[in-house]
């Protein structure tokens, strides 16, 4: 970091308590920053009522439009650690538009913590912004990390923390797609969802030749506080190791761990939106689960007419994630969005997460600008008031699910009209070593609850060196049917378990 480039708050290079906007207890200024500081701060903060951090802003800055907000740009020559021969740089993000809560950002170097202050020297304000007063942009809304993820001579952005407890990352040669969150509370519950925020970050300066960066975060909401530690290593698959301890203000009766948020508008597996020139529009096309019994599940995503919630009961899940299996440009035909380059994100628990269920929420949407897919792990035992609740997991942002499994996997799902009035035709392709080049075709076992399955046929599919299963669903007057399909060779299941919730269009 170059001298004079950033405004810092500190005292003798030591950790200083957050400002009044954080409304939190202070630490002894003589103590260096260590691994227990954020946890202690979160525990003490949990004893106080929640108060959203705020800064009094000039009226003009409170009413920034999207275009005005985009006209506030960080000066890249002021990037933190630029010129220090590290494979990491930080760029800061301003307050404004939807991002109305100030976020404290601290740099930590060998135990010394310094708080960064927003400074007009860090940002350029374009002509759309107008006169918003001296000192704009007044505060930070988050930050992004850059490094040589795609080529050794250029530092590309690969992870960003901004807005509530949201963050997004990419692997090599990918573009941003779905988002992760620190925590989900009361998602799709009748009383409305609660959105925790990351109100402060402590970013450790990486050592020379380090391949990863460590970021600590303080989570806060009306229901809980939390201390988070992220260790991020960019690469072909960018890994994010997460350690978290919650300090509930109330018993968290419906909490989601490892939450992911994505978008599914339309595609061959569900095309309620049928007037788009593109064959598919989505950041993710399916939910993959590797459950505690060693079974791999594949659930294609849908964009239903009414909100749908699906629970996948489990004990000790091995992993789950939202996936983008469509990887060809011709799957989307979108020259701007390039949905084929969106990441798959896999959540791999560390230690046993016990009993509970993976919940998938599918929300109706008519526009691709809205995230309408949410998935998370709901533990059976609710975190209780006054009792710390600790969990950890690894995230992988990559092109595929990192599960070594020999069974056939679902390549694609297509749905159309069946021969009977009101019936649906399903076409499911399977690929992989379990079905490639086999002289004898497997048997497809298909069930529907409720409804009737007819005309089940397994075809060889030389285009993918796999097989194609076709069948028709007669819903027999119902508006919803749960479908299940597996491939068997003899008595052995040789494929993922394909699950699908059909709903009346």
Image: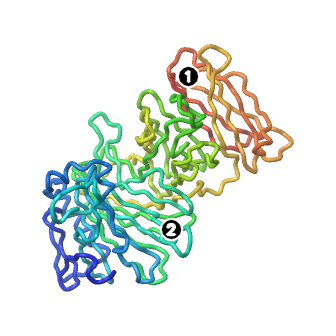
Residue 463 falls in which quadrant of the image? top right
Q: Which residue has dot 2 on it?
A: 234
- Expressed as whole percent of the image width and height from the top left, the position of residue 111 reads 30, 81
Viewer-closest of 300 and 56: 56
Question: From this viewpoint, is residue 110 visible?
Answer: yes
Find the distance from the CA under tag 2 to the CA under tag 1.
46 Å
Residue 230 placed where, x, y %? 40, 66
Which dot marks residue 167? none
- Residue at x 15%, y 60% (from the top left corner): 133
What is the secondary structure assignment of the residue under circle 1? Answer: loop
Dot 2 crowding, Cα within 10 Å, few <14, some 14–19, many 20+: many
The image position of residue 470, as x and y in percent, is 71, 29
Label 1 CA crowd tier, 10 Å (few <14, some 14–19, many 20+)? some
Q: Secondary structure at mark 2?
A: loop
Q: Is residue 388 visible?
A: no
Circles 2 and 1 in contact, beta carbons < 8 Å: no
Q: Residue furthest front?
A: 127
417 in relation to 442, above or below:
above
Q: Nearer the viewer, residue 387 or 146?
A: 146
Q: Please name the residue shown 46% across and 36% down the image.
A: 310
> Which quadrant of the figure contains the N terminus?
bottom left
Residue on which the image places disc 1: 450
Q: Is residue 425 above or below residue 21?
A: above
Q: Earlier in the sequence, mark 2 or mark 1?
A: 2
């Amino acid at each position: 970091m170059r001298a004079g480039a950033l405004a810092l708050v500190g005292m003798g290079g030591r950790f200083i308590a957050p400002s009044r906007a954080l409304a939190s207890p202070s630490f002894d200024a003589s103590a260096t920053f260590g691994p227990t500081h954020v946890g202690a701060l979160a525990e003490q903060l949990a004893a106080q009522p929640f108060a959203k951090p705020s800064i009094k802003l000039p009226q003009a800055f409170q009413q920034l439009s999207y275009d005005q907000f985009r006209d506030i740009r960080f000066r890249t020559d002021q990037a933190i650690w630029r010129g220090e021969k590290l494979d990491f740089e930080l760029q800061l993000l301003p307050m404004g538009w939807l991002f109305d809560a100030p976020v404290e950002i601290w740099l930590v170097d060998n135990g010394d913590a310094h708080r960064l202050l927003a400074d007009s020297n860090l940002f350029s304000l374009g002509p759309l912004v107008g006169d918003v007063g001296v000192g704009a942009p007044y505060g930070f809304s988050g930050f992004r990390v850059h490094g040589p993820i795609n080529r050794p001579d250029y530092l590309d952005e690969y992870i960003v923390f901004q807005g509530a407890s949201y963050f997004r990352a990419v692997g090599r040669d990918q573009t941003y797609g779905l988002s992760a969150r620190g925590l989900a509370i009361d998602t799709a519950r009748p009383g409305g969802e609660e959105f925790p925020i990351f109100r402060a970050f402590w970013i450790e300066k990486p050592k020379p030749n380090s391949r990863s960066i460590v970021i600590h975060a303080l989570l806060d909401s009306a229901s809980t506080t939390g201390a988070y530690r992220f260790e991020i290593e960019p690469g072909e698959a960018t890994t994010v190791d997460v350690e978290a301890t919650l300090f509930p203000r109330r018993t968290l009766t419906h909490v989601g761990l490892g939450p992911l948020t994505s978008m599914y508008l339309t595609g061959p597996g569900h095309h309620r939106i049928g007037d788009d020139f593109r064959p598919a529009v989505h950041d993710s096309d399916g939910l993959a689960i590797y459950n505690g019994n060693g079974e791999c599940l594949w659930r294609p995503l849908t964009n239903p007419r009414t909100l749908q919630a699906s629970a996948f009961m489990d004990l000790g899940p091995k992993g789950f994630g939202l996936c983008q299996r469509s990887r060809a440009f011709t799957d989307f035909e979108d020259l701007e969005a390039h949905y084929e380059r969106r990441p798959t994100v896999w959540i791999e628990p560390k230690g046993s997460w016990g009993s509970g269920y993976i919940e998938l929420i599918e929300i109706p949407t008519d526009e691709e600008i809205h995230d309408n897919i949410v998935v998370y792990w709901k533990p059976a035992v609710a975190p209780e008031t006054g009792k710390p609740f600790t969990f950890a997991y690894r995230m992988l942002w990559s092109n595929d699910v990192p599960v070594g499994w020999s069974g056939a996997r679902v390549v694609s799902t297509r749905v159309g009209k069946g021969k009977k009035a009101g019936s649906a035709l399903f076409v499911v392709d399977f690929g992989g070593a379990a079905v490639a080049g086999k002289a004898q075709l497997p048997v497809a076992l298909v069930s529907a609850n409720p409804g009737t399955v007819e005309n089940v046929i397994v075809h060889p599919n030389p285009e993918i060196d796999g097989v194609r299963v076709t069948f028709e669903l007669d819903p027999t007057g119902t508006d919803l049917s749960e479908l299940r399909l597996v491939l068997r060779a003899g008595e052995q299941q040789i494929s993922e378990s394909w699950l699908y919730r059909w709903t009346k269009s």
